[in-house]
């Protein structure tokens, strides 16, 4: 859940464990809001780059959550979105029967890791 992610990142920040770049892959398990995004960015203040991985999930919050992520990234210079939703929709063979979960070490997991790495390298 998004709020759990906030708590984890706040704890890491408090312990001085956040890196210069942070990857956030949250929003698949429920709706998020602009206020949630702003709260996350408040926690991540001072981080040079935050990659938000948008969501691919057969739930009514997929598109609204992806809009929150896109709009939030547009408001914060340090934030960028890795467009997993588009890539995942083009490759349904990567997913298990639920259409959401990837096989560990499978081609979808490799593609997701590559997408995040490519997004991190863009400036």
Image: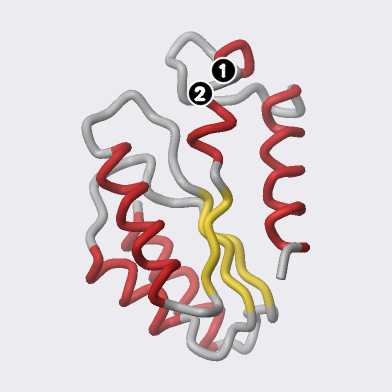
Whole-percent x, y for residue 104 in the image: 69, 27
Residue in the foreground of this view, choosing between 87 and 99? 87
Q: Quadrant of residue 80?
A: bottom right
Residue in the foreground of this view, choosing between 33 and 9? 33
Reading the image, the residue beneath label 2 is: 89
Whole-percent x, y for residue 103 in the image: 65, 22
Secondary structure under the numbered disc 2 in the rendered image: helix
Residue in the foreground of this view, choosing between 70 and 14? 70
- Image quadrant for the C terminus? bottom right
Q: Is 12 drawn above or below residue 53 in the view shown?
A: below
Q: Is 52 drawn above or below residue 92 in the view shown?
A: below
Mark seen at residue 109: none
Could you classify mark 1 by the number of other residues whose Cα lies within 10 Å: few (under 14), some (14-19), or many (20 or more)? some
Could you classify mark 2 by the number of other residues whose Cα lies within 10 Å: few (under 14), some (14-19), or many (20 or more)? few
Q: Residue at x 39, y 84 (%)?
A: 42
Secondary structure under the numbered disc 1 in the rendered image: loop
Whole-percent x, y for residue 65 in the image: 31, 48
Q: Quadrant of residue 12?
A: bottom right
Reading the image, the residue beneath label 1 is: 95
Q: Residue at x 57, y 70 (%)?
A: 50
Q: Is 117 drawn above or below residue 84 in the view shown?
A: below
Q: Residue at x 32, y 62 (%)?
A: 3
């Amino acid at each position: 859940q998004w709020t759990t992610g906030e708590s984890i990142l706040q704890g890491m920040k408090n312990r001085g464990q956040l890196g210069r770049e942070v990857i956030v892959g949250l929003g698949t398990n429920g709706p998020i809001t602009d206020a949630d995004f702003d709260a996350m960015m408040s926690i991540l203040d001072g981080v040079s780059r935050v990659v938000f991985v948008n969501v691919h999930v057969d739930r009514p919050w997929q598109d609204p959550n992806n809009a929150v992520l896109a709009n939030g990234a547009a408001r914060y210079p340090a934030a960028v979105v890795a467009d997993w939703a588009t890539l995942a929709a083009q490759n349904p063979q990567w997913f298990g029967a639920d259409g959401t979960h990837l096989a560990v070490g499978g081609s979808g997991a490799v593609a997701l890791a590559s997408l995040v790495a490519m997004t991190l390298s863009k400036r």
